[in-house]
Amino acid sequence: MVDAIEALRFSLNNDLYKLNSISQNLANVSTSGYKRELPTFSQYDPVGYTNRSDVANVQKMHQVKHKDFSQSTLKYTANPADLSIDGNALFVVDVDGVARAARVGTLRVSNEGRLVGIHNELFMGQTGAIQLEPGNFEIDESGVVMQNGQAIDKLKLINAADLNPEAYLGNGFYDLNSLTSTSAEPINAKVRQGFLETSNVKTMDEMVRLIETTRHFESVHGVLKAYDDVMNLAINKLAEF
C-alpha cells in the first residue's frame, strides 16, 4: 500500500513539473526568440535499486527541461537594429564578464562603441567584443559586421546542439560554461538583420497538453484520495477491536 501511494505521489509531482513548463511556454508565446520547454524524466535513480526496501530512494526520478530549438518564423521588422538567426545556432554574448548565448538581439552602439543588446550584453566577434564608430552598421548573412563599407569583425556563433539541456537561464540567455561538446561540423545558419524570430510555441498544442496533464493529475489525485479513504477505514476498524 505504501509503495502504491509513493508511486502516485511521484506521478503528481511529475504532472506539476509538466504544468510548470506549459505555463512557462504559454507566458512566452509572444517573446521573440523563445524556444519551448519540453520536460523529460530520466530513469529511476540507479542508487535506489541497491535497496528496494528503501521506497524513497527507489522512486527518485531526475527531471530535466530540454529546449526545442526548431526554427520558427522570422518576422520582418524593417529595423536594422533587430537581429535573428535562421538555423540551429546562437550568438555568443558577454553578460557582465560571463560568456552567454542568445538567439535574438535588438542592437545598438554603446557610448564606448561596443555592439550591445537591450540588456547591455556585448555581442562577441571572432576577436572579442565588436568595436564600432557611432552611426549605422550592416550585418550580412554570414555574420560579417560592416561599417562605412569596411568589414569590422564577424559575429561569433555556436551550435545549439552543443548546449547542456538545462542551460537556459532566462531573459533569452543560455549558459556557455556547461557545453556538452564542441561540434566539428560548420554551423549551418544565416544571420538575418532587420528580422526577429517569433516564439516556436504553438498555443493550441500547449492548451491540449494543459488539458491532458490536468485531467491526469485529477485522476491520480482521485486514486490517491481513494487509497487514503481505505486506509482510514482500515485504521478505524482496527480501533474497534
Image: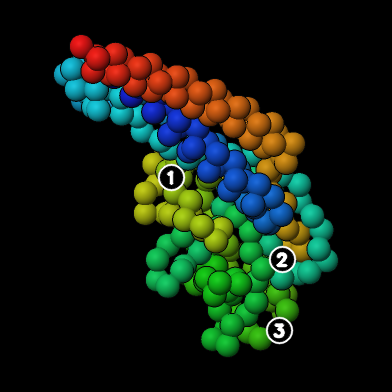
Q: Which mark is residue 77?
A: none
Image location of residue 219, percent across then percent down: 54, 23
234 up-or-down from 36: above or below: above
217 up-or-down from 123: above or below: above
Residue at disc 3, secondary structure: loop
Image location of residue 181, percent across then percent down: 40, 41
Q: Residue at x 44, y 49 (%)?
A: 167
Image location of residue 99, percent across then percent down: 42, 62
Q: Does the image show residue 62?
A: yes
Quarter the N terminus occupies:
top left
Residue located beneath label 1 in the image = 166
Residue located beneath label 2 in the image = 82
205 up-or-down from 153: above or below: above
Q: Which mark is residue 135?
A: 3
Q: In front: 33, or 161?
A: 33
Which label sits in the foreground, 3 or 2?
A: 2
Q: Does the image show residue 127?
A: no
Q: Residue flagged by tag 2: what amino acid is it? A: Asp
> Within 10 Å of the Cα at label 2, are there few (<14), some (14-19), or many (20+) other Cα atoms?
many
Residue at disc 2, secondary structure: strand
Q: Residue flagged by tag 3: what amino acid is it? A: Gly
Residue at disc 1, secondary structure: loop
